[in-house]
Amino acid sequence: MTCLCGGLVLSLAWTSPGFGQTSSTEPIAFESDTTALKSDITRVQPMTGIVLWHDHEQAATDAIAMEFRYCGYDEVVMADGTYDFGAIDRVLKEVAGRGHQAVLRFRFVYPGKRTTVPACIRSQPGYQETIANSEGKKTWFCDWSHQGLQEFTLEFYERFAQRYDHDPRMAFLQTGFGLWAEYHIYDGPRELGETFPDKAFQERFLRHMSATFDSLPWSISVDAADNSYSPIEDNASLLALNFGVFDDSFLCKQHAKYNAVNWGALGSDRWRRAPGGGEFSYYNRRDQKLALSENGPNGVGFEEAAKRFHITYMIGNDQPAFQSIERIREAGMATGYRFRILRAQFRQVKPGQANVMIELTNEGVAPIYRDAYLAAGKVRSAESLRELMPGKTRVYRIDSVPLIDVDRISIQCDFILPSQTISFNASTD
């Protein structure tokens, strides 16, 4: 039996009765020869790849699957304290219109700019921001001693989660404090409890985020490993939270001595449950120009580093100036998950119905971080692909499939756009 589904040609054949266990961390021995399957992954998979900013002139390319945007809290919360997510919805609609998902980062502080603390908080008694030079620019810093700002921050993400936690237009959320929300103030007034949240509030914030978001993966900067800023290092209960990590100076010269150490401090196995991402380094023009060259800007190629750090996505907004779209696509396809069907078999269990067994492996560098399921027609496997780690193989069972659908194999996910498809490789005889 042969099927053409989503550009994937699958040829399946009936098996003999009794095909063994339904799920395993190791491949199982099928009771008949593997049937011929032929399909190829030809594009960057949803929720993976190189990321351009939403306003990039080439953002419409199919060489990417996601777009990035900084967001201000005052874009959502009006001067009278009311919430209006219209600005965020417009961004998500625009990005989705290009067939992409969004990576959003909310920030309070940006060099050379006023804070995005809503006016309803700034006007409260006792709130006083600090103005100082940072990165050579006049910059406004939040007043983290103010209880109103702390409570607002917790409330904001609760409201955001209520609206977007299951929105397929969103791929990932980034958050944090300090310059660019990157968990540091290297240049400027760094005072915990004043211009940067104290450790007690940070701990409260992290636990609140973990409890608030059920589906949407959220991440903080790798610089949160610095115990001069944060309470995370050596705190087992905080390290157990399912936050992801973004590295905003990926492939910089000092990456092995500093960034990589921070990745390890935040949990060397964090990638098993939460995404690793970031942005190519802007320390110098060389870092950007050579980010996707064979040996990278400092002797380590992107594909090698992506494998080592289990990278799912990487912001590379300047890359179209230095690399072809095809190279950007190629690099994007070296990130995240990459599924291959090794064998697919089915047997009739009663008139008009069959059970399907599929042996699947993950040839990528990371797992998929939202639930996705193998499906035959409209019937899904009971088990999500989320737990399938790189280099591992598992057998999935799909029960009670109408006979007319047994050869309509796909991967279904409720957290991607209708225009997106999770593809898979298959090439067996």
Image: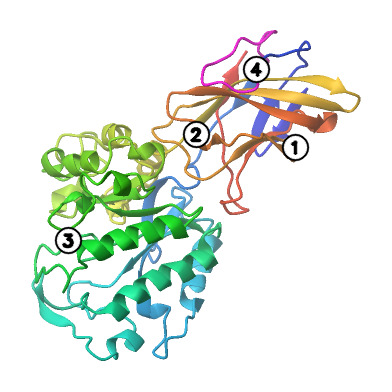
Per the image, the residue denoted by label 1 is 377
Residue 179's place in the image compared with 284, above or below, is below
Q: Position of residue 41 (x, y in %)?
A: 53, 34
| Dot 2: element | helix
The label shown at residue 387 is: 2
* Colour approach in the figure: rainbow
Q: Earlier in the sequence, mark 3 or mark 4?
A: 4
Image side of residue 424 versus residue 135, left or right: right
Nearer to me, 162 or 323: 162
Q: Position of residue 395 (x, y in %)?
A: 60, 22
Q: Position of residue 39 (x, y in %)?
A: 60, 28
Nearer to me, 354 or 123: 123
Tell me the quadrant of the picture where the C terminus can be found.
Answer: top right
Per the image, the residue denoted by label 3 is 184
Magenta stretch contains residue 30:
yes
Q: Earlier in the sequence, mark 1 or mark 4?
A: 4
